[in-house]
Image: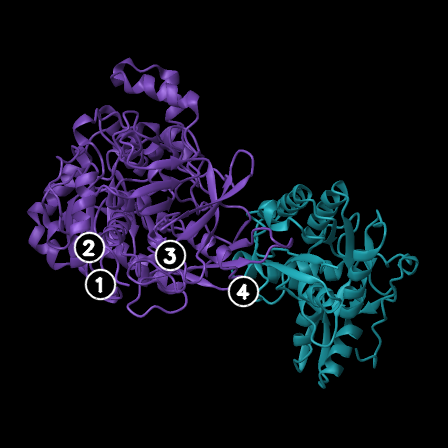
Amino acid sequence: MNTQVAAVTGAGGYVGGLIRQALSESGWRVVGLVRRLRDLDDIPYDLAAGLDPGVLRGVDLLVHCAWDFRAARRADDWRINVGGCRRLLTAASEAGVGRVIVVSSIAAFPGTHQRYGRAKLAVEAAARAHGAAVIRPGLVFGERPGGMVGTLERLAGLPLIPLPASASDQYLLHERDLGAAVLRLATLPELPRRPLVLAHPAPVGMKDLVTELARRRGSRPVIVPVPWAPAYVLLRLGEVSHLDLPVRADSLWGLAHPPPPPPADLAELGISPRPFRAGDEP
Amino acid sequence: MPSAIVIGSGPAAAGVLLALTAEPGWAVTVVDMGIDLDPETRTVLERLAAAPPREWAEDDVARVARRAADSRDGGLPETKLIYGSDYVYRDAGQLSPLAVGPGVHPQLISAAYGGFSSAWSAQVLPFPETAFRTWPFGAGELAPHYAAILRAIPFAATTDDLAEELPLYADPLPPLPLSAAASAILERYRRNRRLLRRRGLTLGRARLAVKSAGCTLCGLCMSGCPYSLIYSSAETVGRLRAAKRITYLGGLRAVRIDQQEGATEASVTVESLSDGSRRTLSADRVVVACGAIGTSRLVLESRRLHGVRLSLQESAQIIMPLLSLHGSGDPRDSSKHAMGELSMLMRIPELGAEPVHLQYFTYNPAFLDALPGPMREGPGRRLLPSVLGRLSVILGYLPSGASRRVDLRLVAAATDGAPGVLSVEAPPADRAHARLVRKVCLRLAGMGPWLDLYPIMPKVILSGAARSYHWGSAFPHRATPGALDTDRWGRLQGWDRVHLVDASVLPSIASTTFTLTVMANSHRIGSEVVRGLPA
C-alpha cells in the first residue's frame, strides 16, 4: 500500500508541529507548508500569497493550522488569514484533496468580540462551505508547551507575577490528545459537520494554571491579580508603537473573556481529552 | 552530420544558436513551448505598425498599452504586460507545481517565444572585469562573443565614460534621443565630471538593444513597441527559422533530459502542450537554455535530485524615485521614448571593486499611477506638470555578492512519478541590505548639488527576492567542478553531451544587467562545441 500523504500548513509552529509529529509517527508522509523551511519535505507557504493547487495534487489529507499573527490592522488580518484560508481551500478543491481539517480555536464561539475569535469564525464558515472538518482546540499544553501555555509557562518563572484575568476559566487540551484527535478525524468514515471543541470540559482558573506551570518548573512565584483592562490598554499602546511584546492585547482579551464550557460530544467520536490536573505530569 | 537539440528560445538559446549555425554542417533542432501573443492582438499590432502614431485608432492604442495593476509591495507592477497581454508569464506547465516563500516573486520561468526577452528593458551592458574573479576564465575570453552578439542584434549606444569599464565591443547604432530631463542630467555630469568621478560615479548613455533609427518617440516602449523595434531573442530564432538553418518544434515542454553512461548522444523527452503525448528526441548534443530556474527544475527532475538545495545568486533590484530641483517642463507635452536613458556605475567602499548599476528613467505613463490620488485628480492637480517635470526613477541593481540568495529545491510529489514541487524561498532582506540601499541613496543625494537628483527616501524600495529577473549560478562554471558545478562548457558530471548554457552557469551576477553576458557565454559554449571539445 502506498504511504498516505498529509500536508500541514503552519507545520513549523507549535500546534502544526504537534500535528505533523502525530501524523508522521502514524506512518503518514507529511509535507509541511511553512513560512521558513526546516525539513526536507517542507514547502514554502505564505498565507497572503496563496498556493498553487499543483502542490496539493495527490495529497490525501490537508490540515490547515497556519495563522499569521503579524497583521496590525483588522483588514490585513482578514485579508491574510481569512482570505488565505479561502484561497487554500479552493486550491485543495482544485487539487482533489481527499480530506481537509481546519484548525480553529476554542476562542471561536458565537458572540465573541475578540478579533482572533471572530476571524476564526469566518474561517470556519469557509471550511464548512468546502466540506472541511473544523476543530477548536483549547489551550494546548504538554511537556514543552508552546503557544499561549508556553508564554504562561515562561511567565511562571518570574518571582513576582502580576496576573491579569486571574479568575477567568480556561479549557485545556493535551498535546497528544490533539494529535490523536487529528488522526481520528483523518480516518473517520464520515467527518462531523459541527465544529469539534477539543478540550477537557473541566475549567482551570488562570491562577491555578500559572501556579501549576510554575510548580512543574520548580518555581514558587508570588502571583498578584491585576485588572485586565489597564494591561490591555498598555499592550495596545505597545502594539501601536511597534514594540515587540510577548503577549498580544487581543490574546489578553481572549483570556479575560473565556469561552463557554466545551460540549460533551467527543466520546461518541472516540476522542477523550485528558484533564489538566495538579500532579498529572504528561 | 553532427546534431544538436536546443531547449528554449530565450536569449541563451539565441546566443548558442548563432554559434551553432555560424558554420554549415550542424543539424540544429529547437524544442520550445513557444507561447505567443494572441492573434487578435497581433492583428492590432500589425495595424499600428503600418501607420504613424497620429493615425492610430484610440481603441488600438488602449488595447496594446494596457498596464497591470500596482504591486502588493508598492514596487513595480507584479506583471509587466506586453501589448496588453500577460503571455510572457503564462503558466503552460513550466511553473506548476510551484511553491514560493513570503516575498518571493513567482514569475520565475517563461514559456514565451523569446522567453523573458519579450518583456525586458533591452539594456545590453557587459559584465565589468571585476565580476569575473570567481570565474574559471576572464572577461577577455568573452570579448569576441560579446562582439559577435552585439553585431547580431540591434545595439544603440555611444562611446562615453562607461566604455572605460564596459567596452562597447562593436560599432553601435546611434542612441535613442534623450528627453529634456535626461539631457540636463548628462550636461550637469559633463560640467562636474571630474568631481563626480572622484566621488565614485561614472555616467553615460544607456546601451539598448533597439533599432533606434525607426523610433517615432510614441512613448509606448514599456508596454511593447508597436513597431517591434525592441529586440527579442524571438527575432533571432525567427530569422534562423526563415533561413531554414534550424528546425523549430513549438508547443513542446521538455520534461526530462538524459544521457546513458558512455553514450555519444543525449536525449530530451518532450511533452506536447496540446495533447500531453510524450516522445524522446536524441542528438549528439542537448543544449539546455530554459532560463536559470527552468533549467534548474529540469536538471533536478531529470536526476531525481529531491531535497537538494540550489542556492542561486541574484543581482537585487532597488526602485528609487527621484526629484530634481530644476524642472524640465511637463513631459506629457513632448514626444519621448520610455526606455532607460542613462546608466550610472556607482562605487561604494563596502562593495570593493564591484559597482552598483543605476538605470535612469524619465517620465512614462506609469508615473501617474504611482502618484497619490489628490495629486492626480484632486486639489494637487495644478502642481502635476511641475511635479512630473521634476520626477524620475532609477532602477538600481546590486552585485550578487551584496544581494540575498534565492534557494531552490525540488520536493517529491505526493503522487509517485508526478513532477516534484519546485520550492523557492529567500531569507528576508536584513539590516545590512537596508543599510546598503540607504548608502546608495545618500551617496546619490550627496551628489545632488552637482547632478540635481535627490532620492525620495521613504519611497525607495528593495524589491522582493527574484524580482530583478537577474538570477542564476545554480550550476556555476568551475575550473574543478563539484557535483553540482559545470565545466566551462556547461556540463555536469556524467553528462558530457548535455550543455547548460543560460544564467544557471554564470559563476556570479554583476549589477550591469546580465542578458548580454548570458548570450555571449552561450555563444562561447556553442562556438567551442562547433570547433570540437577535447576528449
Calculate the distance from the C-alpha at mark 3 to the C-alpha at mark 1.
27 Å
Q: Residue at x 72, y 81 (%)?
A: A222
- CA–CA distance between discs 4 and 1? 49 Å
Q: Residue at x 84, y 76 (%)?
A: A277
Reading the chain from its start, which is encountered first: label 3 or label 1?
1
Q: Tell me the subunit letter for badge 1.
A: B
Mark 1, other Cα within 10 Å: few <14 / some 14–19 / many ≥20: some
Res A244 label: 4
Q: Chain of mark 2?
A: B
Residue A262: x, y in percent? Answer: 86, 58
Please tell me whether mark 3 sits on a helix, a strand or a loop.
loop
Q: Which amino acid does the dot numbered 2 rest on?
A: Leu
**Discs 2/3, front:** 3
Q: Are marks 3 and 4 on the same chain?
A: no
As measured in the structure, the alpha-carbon distance from the residue carrying label 2 to the one carrying label 1 is 9 Å
The residue labelled by disc 2 is: B142
Q: Amino acid at mark 3?
A: Thr
From this view, report whether residue B321 is shown above or below residue A66.
Answer: above
x, y percentage for residue B64? Answer: 38, 25
Q: Amino acid at mark 4?
A: Asp
- Whether residue A191 sits left or right of residue A37 in the image: it is right
For the residues labelled 2 and 1, say whether their Cβ atoms are less than 8 Å apart. Answer: yes
Question: Alpha-carbon distance for marks 2 and 3?
Answer: 28 Å
Answer with the quarter of the image where residue B62 lies: top left
Provide the residue designation for mark 3.
Answer: B264
Give the crowd class for mark 3: few <14, some 14-19, many >=20 residues within 10 Å: few
Element assignment for label 4: loop
Distance Cα–Cα, label 3 vs label 4:
62 Å
A75 above or below A21? above
